[in-house]
Amino acid sequence: MPGSSKNLDPGPFLEKWGLTLVGTRPARSQAQIFEVTLEDEVPAILKVYRLLSLGSEAEAPKFLSLMNGAACVRLLRECPGALLLERLEGNMLQSVVSRGDDETATEIIIDIAEAIRKKRFGFKPARNLELRFDTLLKTDRNAHPALNTATFQKAIDVARMSLDRDSRAERGLLHGDLHHTNIVEGKREWCAIDPMTLYGEAEAEYGQAFCNPSHEVEIVNNPERAIRIANQINARTALSQERLIAWGVVMAAHSLVKEVNRLPFEQRELNRTAARLEAIVAAYGAVS
């Protein structure tokens, strides 16, 4: 069932595609990853989903087919309930930040986002940004003290403004979840994985860049870093610094709501997430 952490059975897909199982990763709420080899011993990843529809990644096969390996993991095969993907065996992008090279990590995010932007009119995803952030906008501010603050109210105001502007902007295909653990180094290049596949303005693709890697608290929870990222993206793409940071605010507020609703509840993570939102809202105030 969706939301469960029960292990999934890869057997039918191993048989269907002639795969050999070589490793099993922990089950997640939506899917489970299995390391496999093809009949010619080429390494691959089998991703088995809890829903035949693939849940929130329902349009991932279409997205990955369109990208055809350009800045994204290659889709090898697909069927209801499972994807077979190339195996990327390098580090996640968060490792670049951890070694002290946050600016290089941002350049890699820009490389990938711009590769996707080149194909933004390839198809129109079913899910737009209003649907993506529906939970945020409907959140009861009285549900938790962390939501009943001037900072969170400002974030809601920014979210409503951003979604209104998005509805009138030139919109296109977005990965929709382009953060530092969804970008992995492969033999060809750094590649995005796990596309959420959304429809929206280009600036929204970078919202996660402001909030991640979330465990690097001293780096991420710094308003100057958010301004630097916006300037760095603008220099490469001419996208609006104000709109870029606005989507950082939206994503940070969305993350705070998730932390409030997380079970089991973790106060330390909630405090970190609230501080991140405070920092990005401060950065937004400096550029707007």
Image (cartoon, grey):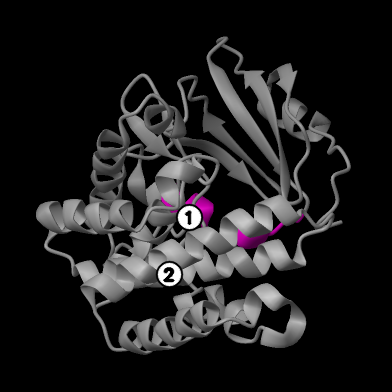
Q: Residue at x 67, y 52 (%)?
A: 269
Disc 2 residue crowd, few under 14, some 14–19, many 20+, Cα 10 Å: many
> What quarter of the picture does the N terminus occupy?
bottom right
Residue 147 highlighted magenta (yes or no): no
Residue 140 visible: no
Viewer-nearest residue: 147 or 115? 147
Q: Residue at x 36, y 19 (%)?
A: 187
- Give the residue type that dot 2 points to: Val
Q: State whether residue 7 is above or below residue 81.
A: above
Viewer-nearest residue: 91 or 275? 275
Lateral position of residue 123 relative to residue 145, left or right? left
Q: State whether residue 190 is above or below residue 202.
A: above
> What quarter of the picture does the C terminus occupy?
bottom left
Q: Which residues are magenta?
A: 51-64
- Give the residue type that dot 1 points to: Asp
Q: Position of residue 49 (x, y in %)?
A: 72, 47
Disc 1 residue crowd, few under 14, some 14–19, many 20+, Cα 10 Å: many
The residue carrying mark 1 is 177
Residue 55 highlighted magenta (yes or no): yes
At mark 1, the secondary structure is: loop
Lateral position of residue 78 relative to residue 212, left or right? right
The circle drawn on residue 249 is 2
The circle drawn on residue 68 is none
Q: Position of residue 238 (x, y in %)?
A: 11, 62
Residue that protrudes farthest toward the top in the picture? 41
Q: Position of residue 254 (x, y in %)?
A: 56, 69
